[in-house]
Amino acid sequence: DAGVIQSPRHEVTEMGQEVTLRCKPISGHNSLFWYRQTMMRGLELLIYFNNNVPIDDSGMPEDRFSAKMPNASFSTLKIQPSEPRDSAVYFCASSFIGNTIYFGEGSWLTVV
Amino acid sequence: AQSVTQPDIHITVSEGASLELRCNYSYGATPYLFWYVQSPGQGLQLLLKYFSGDTLVQGIKGFEAEFKRSQSSFNLRKPSVHWSDAAEYFCAVGAVQGAQKLVFGQGTRLTINP
């Protein structure tokens, strides 16, 4: 079975550029999560969706960050404009509500 | 709100030795508890989980964990570690209801001496 698929795996971009991270959850899962991992703050939940609807975006750092889930099999996390402090690993994860959350391999973002 | 504390930032053990990684949680109701492992440059892989029932849970790769409600702990153990167990280990607590937001501890980095 395919797991959570994220792209790109690695991205290096210049400050001010737009960054779009993509995620395909596991088929049949109806919850999707975006996490960010940094050395300083560890793993933080940015936003999660149930049945494609954003439920809690309290972890989104600021207005530069936005996330969408247009359908059950696709989600994006966009940063515009990007800043060096956004450099982190961004994980997408999915679950069937009330069950185990499975993580993707992560998108390693470096903003220079 | 739930929280997780992993008191040990870094642990070093010798190959073949036993291992215990500590995890303490704070949550006002019955928690869902998880241990994930992250190898360098990789994503998080689920080792084991506790939802209910037997408080001693078995996971993959020979790991086990014991839920102790009285101590608010969910420590991870392995009787004999292998060099391939070197990784970062994360304990997480989730709410029983709803979409199960996970709150993670800061992680414990495990180094294995040959």
Image (tube, coloured by chain):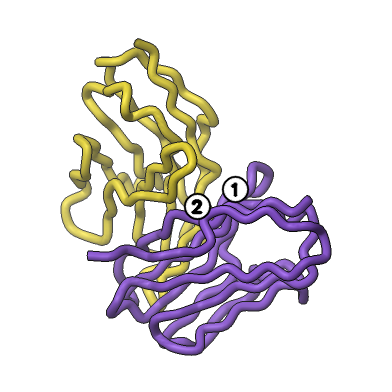
Chain colours: A purple, B yellow
Q: What residue sits 41% from the left and 73% below the top?
A: A24
B65 and A27: which one is in front? Answer: A27
Q: Position of residue B17 (x, y in %)?
A: 28, 16
Q: What residue sits 44% from the left and 22% below the top?
A: B111
Q: Would you place residue B54 above or below residue B32 in this image? A: above
Q: Would you place residue B4 above or below residue A103 in this image? A: above
Q: Position of residue A63 (x, y in %)?
A: 77, 76
A88 and B77: which one is in front? Answer: A88
Query: What chain letter is assigned to the residue under label 1?
Result: A
In the shown orientation, is residue B23 left or right of residue A88?
left
Tell me, yes or no, whether the two marked residues, 2 and 1, touch with CB atoms within 8 Å.
yes
Q: Are marks 2 and 1 on the same chain?
A: no
Q: Quadrant of the N terminus of chain A?
A: bottom left
B73 and A17: which one is in front? Answer: A17
Residue position marked by numbered label 2 in the rendering: B104
Dividing the picture into quadrants, the one containing residue A60 is: bottom right
Graded by Cα atoms within 10 Å as few (under 14), some (14 to 19) or many (20 or more), the crowding at tag 1 reads some
Disc number placed over residue B99 in the picture, else none: none
Graded by Cα atoms within 10 Å as few (under 14), some (14 to 19) or many (20 or more), the crowding at tag 2 reads many
How many discs mark residues in the rendered view?
Answer: 2
Name the secondary structure under disc 1.
strand
The mark lying in front, picked from 2 and 1, is: 1
Query: What chain letter is assigned to the residue under label 2?
Result: B
Q: Amino acid at mark 1?
A: Gly
Name the secondary structure under disc 2.
strand
Residue position marked by numbered label 1 in the rendering: A42
Dividing the picture into quadrants, the one containing residue B83 is: top left
Dividing the picture into quadrants, the one containing residue B87 is: top left
Q: Position of residue B3 (x, y in %)?
A: 53, 54
In the shown orientation, is residue B24 left or right of residue A58?
left
Q: Would you place residue A57 above or below residue B38 in this image? A: below
Q: What residue sits 49% from the left and 80% below the top?
A: A49
